[in-house]
Every structure is written in structure tokens, then in C-alpha cells.
């Protein structure tokens, strides 16, 4: 059991060990959906929701599997729950906002293979957080993901107007930008405890 | 495998006739290394590429683990391709992949505890590596066993190659060593940022820049040549 304060857990997950820029989780949507701020915002909301659902479920599954002594099934159960949660979000978004459904495109079902979500479930298990701590951790991680996505989207919108050499167009430029952002986030190191 | 071509043709459902079975050529393997390299060309599976390439040993371990899962799940998906209903195929693939990942997870733990600690959660995160699910969906679910086997091996080799090309550069610059062996003398001042997270982004970005430059140069040359040919004609 961890005795970290909730505030520290949140800060740690959101900025110090930012899931995207420090732990390299969820790079695909980070590069794929960060072209426009509006899409980035909605993607962030969807990811936060899925993270909360999978965090709660992962806590329950881990407890159950520990009781039954079936821990080798943990990975399979986690991924099955995440896939169902994503399916749920997909149906909700399709029902209530078809425009958003179209703009997120293939990246909505791909939240299933977003490593940030499975990573969250695995990390919270490894760190032995209790229920409330897990929830705060999920919120922090989701918030951090959204922050990184929004920052990137803002930068890329500006970049649309700039003239870059033809060699560096596309993914190469985005990766360089991400590197600079990551460099900036390193400044937070040591702010919220030292563990990874 | 052992079945005669006539029999397999009659068993195959009509929808599969739309996807012609690839015949086994050298290209089946080589394609994954270069033309369809999962990392540099298709930009898939970036998370482990960036996260565990701070040393070349980690990169190699991750590459081999991913190759194992890629080949194992590819073979199983290819064998079961006529039995998995279309509606639940993604879920079935993920369960198959997760099974192989659990095997790798326990395997690495048994072989090298040091490597296990260094790779951390990223071994289990192979499940969500889009290269593997992408291969299962786009290739293994339509092709015969032996081409799938060779193609998965090629893709795995391409992935390992990409991981190594990042891992070696980052280790040499950031640590002054290669596979743990120091390359330079005592006085070498390591470029620490290269083994930290930003270095991963920078090195991968630089590789992509290089490949972009090569591609553009090739296109320009081809254009010039066709221009010359048009003038001559």
C-alpha cells in the first residue's frame, strides 16, 4: 500500500511523469489526432473517460484475480475490459455526436490499442494504489494526456502557417516538436516525488 | 501445408477469393525490412520504439520479444482464419496476442531478470503494439500459413532493425558505449539528453528526416530523367 498524498499522485501523473512526454505512452493518437485543437480536446475527453472506467475495472479485476489466484490471466482480462469500454464510448459518441465521430475517425476504436490506457491499469497495479488513489491517478494521467495533446495541437496549428523545408514536413517535424515539448516537461522533474 | 491445392480451393469461402493468396517470394520477407518497415515507413508501434531504446541491449530484447509475439500470433491467426467469425475478429486477435505476450512476459522473467526490470511494463504493453494487430488484421487473416510465417518474420526483423538503429545511436551519444562496451576513453562527456525521453523523439525525428531526404532526392532524379527522356523524344 502506498501512502502518497492524493495531490502528489495527481501532480506526478499529470506533469512530472507525463504519460506522453516522459513515459512514451499513447504516441500514436498524440501524433495522429493533434492536427486541430478541437479534435484534440474531444479525443482528450474520450481518453479520460475510458481511463476512469478501466481504472475502476482494473482495480476490481486485480482484487478478484488475487483472491482466485489466477494472476496470469490479468493481462487478458485488462485488455478485454478496455476493449469493451472503448466500444461503449464509440457507441455513445456515434449516437450523440456524429460529426465528432467522423472527425475522430479510426482513432476512436484505436483507443483500445492506446498504450496509455493499458499502461495506466498496469502501473496502478504495480504501485498497489487503493481505490481512491487509483481514481486520482487515472484523472491525473488523463489530464496529462490531454495537456500534451492540446499543447501539441496548438503548436501544429501555428506551424500550418509557417514555411518549413519540404524535407521536414509531416511526421519528422511533429517528432522534433514533441522532443522540444518533452525537454520542457523535464523541467518538472523532482517536483512530485522521485519514483517513475 | 500438406493439403492439395484443389482441396483448399474448394474449402475456401468465396469472400477470400477477393484477396488473392500471395505466393512466397523473397519480397515477402524483405518488404518488412525496408519498403514497408513498420516504424520508419508505416509509423506504427512508436511507443516501445521511443521508450525502450535508451540502450542497444534493451532495444534488441524488445525487438526479439515483439518478433516472437508477431510470429506466434500471425501463425495462429492464419491457422484459425476460416473459423473466426468476422464480427468478433478483433477481440479474438487481441486475446490471441495477449496470450503470446503473457508467454513472453514469463519467459523473459525466467531468462533475464535484469532485462525484465529494464523493459518494465513495456513487455506487457506489446499487447497494444499496433504493428501486431495491424499484421493480424491486414495480412495473417487472409494469407496462408507459410507466407504469413515468412512475412511476420520479415516484419519482426524490420521492427528490430528500427529499434536497434535508435538504440545504438542513443547509447553511443548518451552513454558513450555500445551493447554495454565503452567505446571512448575516460574523458568522453556523455550527451545525457539522448538517453532521456527527449532524445528518443529527436533521434527518431532525425532518422525520418534522413529517409525523407533520400526519398525526395530519388523522386527528383526520376523526374529529371523522365524530363530528359521527354525532351529527347
Image (cartoon, coloured by chain):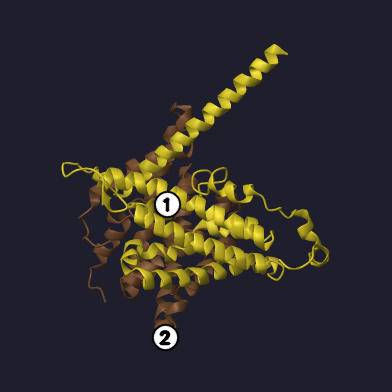
Chain colours: A brown, B yellow
Q: Which residue is drawn at 44% across and 63% down?
A: B125
Query: Of helix, strand and loop, which one carries label 1?
Result: helix
Q: How crowded is mark 1: few (under 14 residues within 10 Å), some or many (20 or more)?
A: many
Residue B88 x/y as whole percent: 65, 68
Q: Is the residue B8 above or below the residue B167 in the image?
A: below
Residue A50 x/y as whole percent: 47, 64
Q: Is the residue B124 above or below the residue A152 in the image?
A: below
Residue B6 x/y as whole percent: 83, 64
Q: Residue at x 63, y 47 (%)?
A: B27
Q: Is the residue B103 above or below the residue B29 in the image?
A: below
The disc numbered 1 marks a residue on which chain?
Answer: B
Between A149 and A165, the residue placed more toward the observer is A165
Q: Single out the residue that lies furthest toward the left.
A: B187
From the image, tell me which residue sits under label 1: B49
Residue A190 x/y as whole percent: 20, 55
User: Closer to the observer: label 2 or label 1?
Assistant: 1
Kindly identify which numbered label has been placed on residue A69: 2
In this picture, residue A183 sits left or right of residue A166: left
Q: How crowded is mark 2: few (under 14 residues within 10 Å), some or many (20 or more)?
A: few
Query: Of helix, strand and loop, which one carries label 2?
Result: loop
Q: In which quarter of the image is residue B185?
A: top left
Q: Distance between the residues labelled 2 and 1?
A: 33 Å
The quadrant of the picture occupied by the C terminus of chain B is: top right
Q: In the rendered image, is residue B206 in sight? A: yes
Q: Single out the residue that lies furthest toward the top.
A: B232
Q: In which quarter of the image is residue B153?
A: bottom right
Amino acid at each position: 500500500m502506498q501512502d502518497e498524498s492524493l495531490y502528489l499522485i495527481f501532480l506526478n501523473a499529470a506533469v512530472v511523469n507525463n504519460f506522453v512526454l516522459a513515459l512514451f505512452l499513447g504516441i500514436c493518437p498524440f501524433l495522429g489526432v493533434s492536427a486541430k485543437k478541437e479534435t484534440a480536446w474531444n479525443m482528450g475527453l474520450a481518453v479520460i473517460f475510458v481511463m476512469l472506467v478501466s481504472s475502476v475495472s482494473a482495480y476490481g479485476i486485480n482484487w478478484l484475480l488475487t483472491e482466485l489466484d489466477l494472476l496470469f490471466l490479468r493481462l487478458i482480462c485488462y485488455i478485454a475490459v478496455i476493449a469493451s469500454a472503448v466500444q461503449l464510448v464509440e457507441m455513445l459518441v456515434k449516437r450523440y455526436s456524429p460529426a465528432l465521430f467522423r472527425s475522430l475517425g479510426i482513432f476512436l476504436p484505436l483507443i483500445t490499442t492506446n498504450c496509455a490506457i493499458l499502461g495506466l491499469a498496469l502501473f496502478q497495479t504495480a504501485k498497489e494504489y487503493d481505490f481512491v488513489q487509483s481514481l486520482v491517478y487515472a484523472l491525473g494521467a488523463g489530464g496529462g494526456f490531454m495537456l500534451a495533446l492540446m499543447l501539441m495541437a496548438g503548436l501544429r496549428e501555428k506551424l500550418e502557417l509557417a514555411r518549413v523545408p519540404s524535407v521536414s514536413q509531416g511526421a519528422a517535424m511533429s517528432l522534433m516538436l514533441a522532443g522540444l515539448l518533452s525537454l520542457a516537461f523535464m523541467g518538472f522533474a523532482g517536483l512530485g516525488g522521485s519514483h517513475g | 501445408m500438406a493439403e492439395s491445392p484443389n482441396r483448399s480451393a474448394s474449402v475456401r469461402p468465396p469472400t477470400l477469393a477477393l484477396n488473392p493468396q500471395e505466393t512466397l517470394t523473397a519480397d515477402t520477407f524483405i518488404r518488412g525490412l525496408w519498403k514497408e518497415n513498420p516504424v520508419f515507413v508505416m509509423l506504427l508501434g512508436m511507443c516501445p520504439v521511443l521508450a525502450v531504446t535508451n540502450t542497444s541491449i534493451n532495444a534488441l530484447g524488445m525487438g526479439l520479444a515483439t518478433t516472437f509475439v508477431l510470429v506466434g500470433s500471425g501463425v495462429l491467426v492464419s491457422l484459425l482464419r476460416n473459423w473466426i467469425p468476422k464480427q468478433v475478429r478483433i477481440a479474438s486477435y487481441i486475446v490471441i496476442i495477449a496470450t503470446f505476450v503473457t508467454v513472453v512476459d514469463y519467459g523473459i522473467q525466467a531468462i533475464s531478470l535484469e532485462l525484465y526490470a529494464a523493459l518494465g511494463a513495456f513487455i506487457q504493453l506489446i499487447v497494444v503494439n499496433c504493428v501486431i494487430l495491424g499484421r493480424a488484421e491486414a495480412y495473417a487473416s487472409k494469407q496462408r500459413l507459410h507466407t504469413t510465417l515468412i512475412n511476420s518474420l520479415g516484419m519482426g526483423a524490420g521492427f528490430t532493425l528500427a529499434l536497434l538503429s535508435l538504440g545504438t545511436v542513443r547509447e553511443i551519444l548518451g552513454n558513450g558505449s555500445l551493447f554495454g562496451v565503452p567505446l571512448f576513453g575516460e574523458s568522453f562527456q556523455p550527451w545525457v539528453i539522448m538517453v532521456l525521453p527527449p532524445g528518443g523523439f529527436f533521434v527518431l525525428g532525425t532518422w525520418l528526416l534522413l529517409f525523407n531526404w533520400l526519398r525526395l532526392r530519388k523522386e527528383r532524379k526520376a523526374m529529371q530523367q523522365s524530363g530528359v527522356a521527354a525532351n529527347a523524344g
